[in-house]
Amino acid sequence: MITRITVAAAMLPLLTGSPVQAACPQELAVYSDGESSVSLEFRPVVEAAATTANAFRMLFADMGLVLDGVVIWNNGVARPNGIITHDCPEGDATGAELDACTIWQGVVYTIAGDGAVDLLPPQGEAAAARILLPDIGRAVRYSPIYGDKTGNVPWDVFDLSGCQE
């Protein structure tokens, strides 16, 4: 027997977005790039890292490569600034050392189902449906990590594809 509650429960994902998006916090979200085998896996930020709003890994399945990413909100006109690095030195590092290991940096945007563009939510909030990392593909392709590799470079848009447990 179908009741009003059953119908309402069945329609809830249609009204609130995808079931993955509705149930997944940003710090556990997984995103996939439809153009390549590159994905983003967000991770919880430890409380000691007060300046970091989000942390993630960028995985290149076809190249066996993992990059580290953080999102830090700047002062002034607040924007979530993403930084993706590879093999940065641990502890204190000079500006030159950080520049040498930085693959990409820029503002991290989200794209809603209706096309509205916004800023990446901090951990604890619902995961964004899509993430835009402007010009990430070109930055990866012309970085030292790519070199003579033949793997795919990512497109700039990543779609929510899952949620880690």
Image (cartoon, helix red, strand yellow):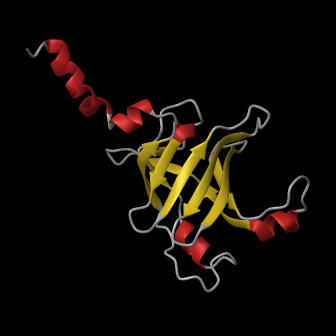
Q: Quadrant of the N terminus?
A: top left
Q: Where residue 151 sits in the image (x, y, percent)?
A: 52, 77
Residues 105 and 123: in front is 123
Q: Residue furthest bottom?
A: 148
**103 relative to 151, above or below:** above
Count of numbered circles in the view: 0
Q: Quadrant of residue 67?
A: bottom right
The residue lying at 72 percent from left, 64 percent from top is 86
Residue at 61%, 54% (x, y): give it.
Answer: 57
Residue 121 in view (yes/no): no
Q: Residue furthest left?
A: 1
The correct choice, above or below, for 118 with respect to 58 in the image is above
**In-image side of 30 versus 88 (left or right):** left
Residue 3 in the image: above or below residue 153 = above
Residue 13: x percent and y percent? 28, 31
Please provide percent x and percent y for residue 87: 76, 64
In-front residue for pair 146/114: 146
Q: Left or right of 137: which side holds 84?
A: right
Q: Nearer the viewer, residue 143 or 164?
A: 164
Q: Is residue 39 left or right of residue 102?
A: left
| Residue 84: image location, x then y, percent | 67, 59
Q: Residue at x 51, y 71 (%)?
A: 62
Which residue: 53% across, 54% down?
A: 40
Q: Is residue 115 visible?
A: yes
